[in-house]
């Protein structure tokens, strides 16, 4: 879902209107840092057990750590390099990451209701909103920069 949402966002934004990546790289990197802090909370509070209870599909701690603590950060840091290089793939990563953080992290607040119908703490809930702050700011900067680039193009 995040990849498709990211693709739609990318097509409607930086695919057609590249922006100055110096404006978005700091919020992007802060989002990565806060995501890693969030994954650490999930690790400490046995996220794989919670997700197994919610979905009914057994998740091993090893698999959770491989994806969330290794593969995802490597992917996002690779995205940072591609963003700095101003590549189309880098701009796609930017959009994909915004969408992934905004929807995946907000889903932590739905998990308690999926688990037993009441609101209570579920693994990762304390820090789930932290990556949202720089991600939302980064999206706002991206949209602001696109408007600026388009306005300058009309003036010339």
Image: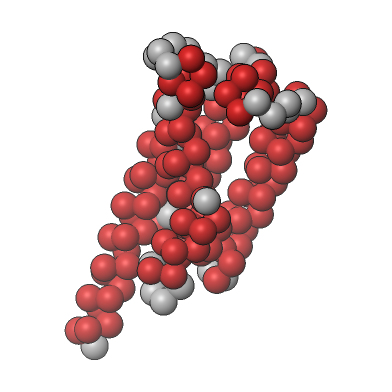
Quadrant of the drawing holding the C terminus: bottom left
Seen at 71% across and 38% down, the residue is 67
Q: Position of residue 111 (x, y in %)?
A: 48, 24
Whether residue 79 is visible: yes
Q: Quadrant of residue 142?
A: bottom left
As drawn, is 129 to the left or to the right of 42?
Answer: left
Q: Nearer the viewer, residue 110 or 79?
A: 110
Residue 41, visible in the rendered structure: no
Based on the displayed image, in which of its 4 quarters is residue 49 positioned?
A: top right
Q: Nearer the viewer, residue 156 or 63?
A: 63
Q: Where's residue 130, x and y in %?
A: 44, 30
- Residue 75, compared with residue 54, is above or below; it is below
Could you tell whether 143 is left or right of 64 in the image? left
* Most foreground residue, 93 or 77: 93
Residue 116: horizontal and vertical position, in percent?
48, 15
Check the image and report above or below for 117 versus 142. above
Q: Is residue 128 left or right of residue 41?
A: left
Q: Position of residue 10 (x, y in %)?
A: 45, 65
What residue is shown at x 69% (from left), y 46% (from top)?
74
Residue drawn at 41 percent across, 76 percent down: 16
Query: Which residue is at the far bottom?
Result: 156
């Amino acid at each position: 879902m995040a990849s498709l949402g990211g693709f739609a966002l990318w097509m409607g934004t930086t695919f057609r209107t590249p922006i100055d990546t110096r404006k978005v790289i700091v919020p992007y990197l802060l989002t990565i840092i806060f995501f890693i802090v969030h994954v650490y909370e999930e690790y400490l509070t046995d996220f794989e057990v919670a997700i197994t209870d919610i979905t009914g599909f057994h998740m091993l701690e090893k698999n959770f750590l491989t994806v969330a603590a290794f593969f995802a950060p490597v992917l996002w840091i690779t995205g940072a390099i591609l963003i700095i290089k101003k590549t189309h793939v880098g701009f796609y990563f930017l959009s994909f990451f915004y969408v992934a953080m905004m929807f995946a992290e907000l889903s932590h607040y739905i998990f308690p209701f999926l688990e037993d119908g009441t609101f209570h703490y579920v693994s990762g809930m304390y820090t789930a909103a932290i990556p949202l702050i720089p991600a939302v700011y980064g999206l706002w900067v991206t949209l602001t920069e696109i408007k600026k680039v388009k306005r300058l193009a009309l003036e010339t």
